[in-house]
Image: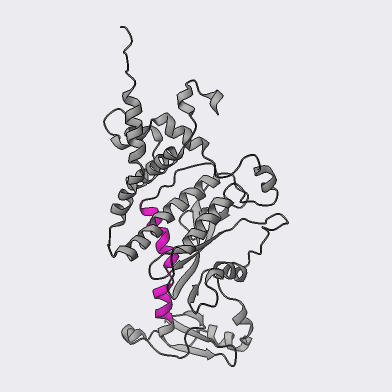
């Protein structure tokens, strides 16, 4: 990139302070809810720009880092890309997920669902999901704690991978097994919904039972029907009619009776359904928290979009760990603002460097 710059100082080598400062500015843009503004808006000289950005680095320096940042070794990328569609981001993604799993112990209730990170650029595994706000983007399967909303494990949908070690099945049951691998056989409960649903138990249920439970014609409002597994098939299937000609069918291996939730009063909702409703939204809450103060910037490079997603999840997870360790409850905005402490060392360095130069006006 250096030959394309007129000033050599605009393309200096990147060091650790540069990375800290760059990430700090991404967080600050998200904190101001201005992450999609043009970069020139943050360095505007008309008095409307925050002073923080100009104090940390120049607009050209930020723009250069935004263009140049990569997440793998470019010398070996071509060989790795022949075996892995995620080659440009795979290493840092796996390291991040490993740290998320190693630094926290999730509770007994977790949610598995998919996130869609908005991206309209070129990507061989870009997905379209009609019921997501982004519609188009990169699909990431996520396992999150249903109570604290800590993201514990993730898996990027990479489409059809080339033959090799990274070629893995993408069916629902395989994805679920990969996500729960760190906590398998630990006695925890997993809420799996949308396209993620356990298929194996359904094979043990007769067609006649599922047909009877799915039939809604003639059934009273707020009525429930139940089917119970036998032997090793320790599961329960319920069908509930919340409104006319509409039923909800749920399968659970956690419940073992047909108890009705007394708090639902006249609607006679089964406890199985109220329990499901209370634990199903773990990943959706993470999505909402990410969007509130998002560090994501518009980009035509999908690895950078994934990287910004990791930055957003890092603020959520780190705040949960901080809260559990210190018992201090902070607003999310205040916590992200405190993350700017990663920037001051570079701010002082920048101000010191700029003080060594004097600007001499041109002769009029």
Left or right: 340, with 114 as reference point: left
Q: Nearer the viewer, residue 143 or 207?
A: 143
Q: Is residue 278 magenta?
A: yes
Question: What colouring method underlies this structural image?
Answer: one colour
Identified at 48% across, 29% down, the residue is 12
Quarter of the figure that contains the N terminus: top right
Q: Which residues are magenta?
A: 273-293
How far across and down, in percent of the image, does residue 46 sit? Answer: 28, 28
- In the picture, the quarter occupied by the C terminus is top left
Quarter occupied by residue 290: bottom left
332, 325: nearer the viewer = 325
Compared across the picture, whether 340 is left or right of 231 comes to left
**Dominant SS in magenta:** helix
**Residue 149 drawn at (x, y percent):** 40, 65
The location of residue 50, given as percent across then percent down, is 29, 36
Numbered marks: total: 0
Q: Is residue 185 magenta?
A: no
Locate residue 222, reporting x and y percent: 40, 85
The answer to whether one can see residue 140 in this image is yes
Residue 4 is drawn in which quadrant?
top right
Compared with 164, 50 (above or below) is above
Residue nearest the observer in this picture, 193 or 90: 90
In the rendered image of this protein, does residue 252 appear above or below residue 121?
A: below
Q: Nearer the viewer, residue 354 or 57?
A: 354
Q: Is residue 107 left or right of residue 323?
A: right
Is 187 on the left or on the right of 171, as rendered? left
Is any atom of residue 33 visible in this view?
no
Q: Residue furthest bottom?
A: 231
Q: Residue furthest right?
A: 163
């Amino acid at each position: 990139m250096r030959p394309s710059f007129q000033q050599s100082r605009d393309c200096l080598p990147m060091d650790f302070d540069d990375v800290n400062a760059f990430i700090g500015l991404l967080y600050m843009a998200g904190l101001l809810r201005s992450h999609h503004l043009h970069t020139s808006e943050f360095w505007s000289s008309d008095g409307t720009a925050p002073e923080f950005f100009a104090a940390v680095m120049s607009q050209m320096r930020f723009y250069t880092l935004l263009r140049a940042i990569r997440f793998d070794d470019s010398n070996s990328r071509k060989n790795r890309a022949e075996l892995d569609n995620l080659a440009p981001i795979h290493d840092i993604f796996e390291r991040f997920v490993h740290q998320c799993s190693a630094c926290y112990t999730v509770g007994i209730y977790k949610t598995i669902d998919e996130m869609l990170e908005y991206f309209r650029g070129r990507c061989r595994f870009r997905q379209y999901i009609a019921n997501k706000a982004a519609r188009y983007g990169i699909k990431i399967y996520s396992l999150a704690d249903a109570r604290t909303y800590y993201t514990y494990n993730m898996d990027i949908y990479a489409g059809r991978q080339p033959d090799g070690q990274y070629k893995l099945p993408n069916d629902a049951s395989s994805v679920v097994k990969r996500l729960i691998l760190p906590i398998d056989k630990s006695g925890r409960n997993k809420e799996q919904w949308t396209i993620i649903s356990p298929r194996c138990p359904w094979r043990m249920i007769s067609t006649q039972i599922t047909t009877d439970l799915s039939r809604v014609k003639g059934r009273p409002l707020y009525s429930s029907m139940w089917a119970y597994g036998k032997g090793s098939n320790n599961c329960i299937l319920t069908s509930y009619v919340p409104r006319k000609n509409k039923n909800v069918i749920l399968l659970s291996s956690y419940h073992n009776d047909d108890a009705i939730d007394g708090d639902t009063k006249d609607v006679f909702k089964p406890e199985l359904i109220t329990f499901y409703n209370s634990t199903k939204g773990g990943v959706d809450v993470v999505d909402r928290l990410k969007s509130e103060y998002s560090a994501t910037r518009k980009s035509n490079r999908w690895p950078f979009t994934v990287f910004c997603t990791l930055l957003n999840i890092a603020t959520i997870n780190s705040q949960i760990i901080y809260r559990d360790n210190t018992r201090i409850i902070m607003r999310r905005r205040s916590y992200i603002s405190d993350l700017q402490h990663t920037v001051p060392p570079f701010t002082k360095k920048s101000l010191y460097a700029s003080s060594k130069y004097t600007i001499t006006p041109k002769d009029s």
